[in-house]
Amino acid sequence: MKRPVRIAITGAAGSISHSLLFKIATGEMIGRDQPVILQLIEIPQAMEALRGIAMELEDCAFPLLHSISLHDDFEEGVLGAHYVLLIGAKPRGPNMERNELIATNAPIFARQGQAINKFANRDVKVLVVGNPANTNALIASRNSPDLSPAQFTALTRLDHNRTLGILANHTGANPKDIRRVAVWGNHSSTQFSDLHHATIYGSPVLQQVDENWYRETFIGKIQSRGAAIIAARGHSSAASAAQAIIHHMHDWINGTPESDWTSMGIVSDGSYGIAKGIFYSFPVRCDYGRYQIVQGLEIQDFAREKMTISQNELLSEMETVAELLPRETEKSHQNLSVCLRSGTTLYDDGISLPDKHYLQTDRVR
Ligand code: NAD
Ligand code: LMR
């Protein structure tokens, strides 16, 4: 049996988490042979609801669910975490753009970035889901000067999956037979869903669909899908977001299939002429826990224009949050061991969390 890994999740009593936690506990995210410790984080007002969710998780008797701890303190909840899923944030309502959430949500990610820097496992992988996800990932990463920006990612897999699902429905193909779609840019209404390199059963997609439909209808439909769901449901996407989180983390950890790639919001290294430093969605291949931007794709003028619009939106979001982006990289030399607290040792990785946070049952203690 493998040693358990620690997964810290914010917004754990929210809508996305309600679908997500049960999938993680079955092994869908990391692997069906990997025990997990869930470190669930919420705001104080939601702790009672969170306790109820923890009871339900326990009642599922998942073999891989090693233990659960509940936290209303982020610093404590992220202690020793190998994976951090930053979901907790306000969702947008009808007729709002995601970047209108900046004023409310951005400061959360600065504080969380600082805490991840100090308390998470040094090899931590972080996924930012709370909107505006790309800019929040930038903020979290810049506030974690001791970690590599490559350890931080933003969720654009939902846009990638929407591209596959809607294209499959339009063409009658099975989504599994569609390869090499790409989502470029911001998780916003400027994102660009690129079918120029995509294939169905090995043949180019753009030879199988009307290019006018692609340009005039399809791209806009993916860009506004989140808003369409909010208009129809009254709440933003939750189950599909949870599925996308599972896919994103699964591929990052376990790799993408050889003949395909995926899309992830990651720090730009200047590839494809995209401004360095912003968190931008690129097509990536993952292998052995790392990702690499797919290089060498031919970018035509139509695509370039759309990619640039989304880049410019991200640059402008970066300006808006400038005061949350420390310029100096001050190395923190604090040893993780000084952060450890006394309490019940969960298992012998040297991490202890205060006793009161474990669910009070025999199984999890
Ligand atoms: P929700 O309102 O149902 O749940 C959010 C939860 O986060 C709440 O329980 C709240 O108490 C908690 N929370 C708020 N601030 C917190 C903090 N500082 N620490 C810990 N917990 C905190 O919202 P949801 O539907 O789960 O969506 C969460 C976020 O994810 C929203 O910002 C939404 O816009 C975003 N989202 C992103 C994508 C994407 O593809 N990137 C997809 C769907 C939703
Ligand atoms: C989505 O894409 O569904 C989420 O980002 C929620 C939203 O605000 O659209």
Image: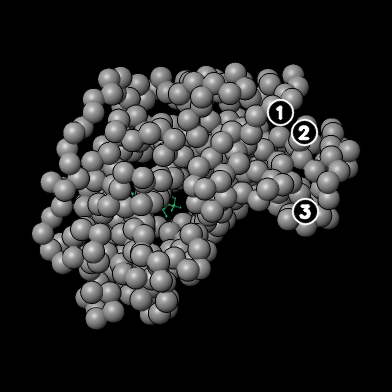
Q: Residue furthest left?
A: 342
State yes or no: discs 1 and 2 in contact (Cβ < 8 Å): yes
Residue 46 placement, left or right of 288: left
Element type at mark 2: loop
| Residue type of the residue flagged with mark 2 | His
Mark 1 is surrounded, within 10 Å at the Cα level, by few (under 14), some (14 to 19) or many (20 or more) other residues, namely few
Quarter occupied by residue 122: top left
- Position of the C terminus, as image quadrant, is bottom left
Identify which residue, 249 or 158, lies in the foreground.
249
State the image coordinates of residue 104 (x, y, percent, origin top left). Answer: 34, 37
| Residue type of the residue flagged with mark 3 | Asp
Of callouts 1 and 2, which one flags the residue occurring earlier in the amino acid sequence?
2
State the residue position of label 2. Answer: 196
Does the rendering let one see residue 48? no
Mark 3 is surrounded, within 10 Å at the Cα level, by few (under 14), some (14 to 19) or many (20 or more) other residues, namely few
- Indicate yes or no: mark 2 CB to ligand 2 under 8 Å: no
Q: Is residue 16 above or below residue 96?
A: below
Q: Is residue 282 above or below residue 262?
A: above
- Numbered tag placed on residue 345 in the rendering: none
Element type at mark 1: loop
Mark 3 vs mark 1, foreground winner is: 1
- Numbered tag placed on residue 177 in the rendering: 3
- Indicate yes or no: mark 3 CB to ligand 1 under 8 Å: no
Residue 156 placement, left or right of 305: left
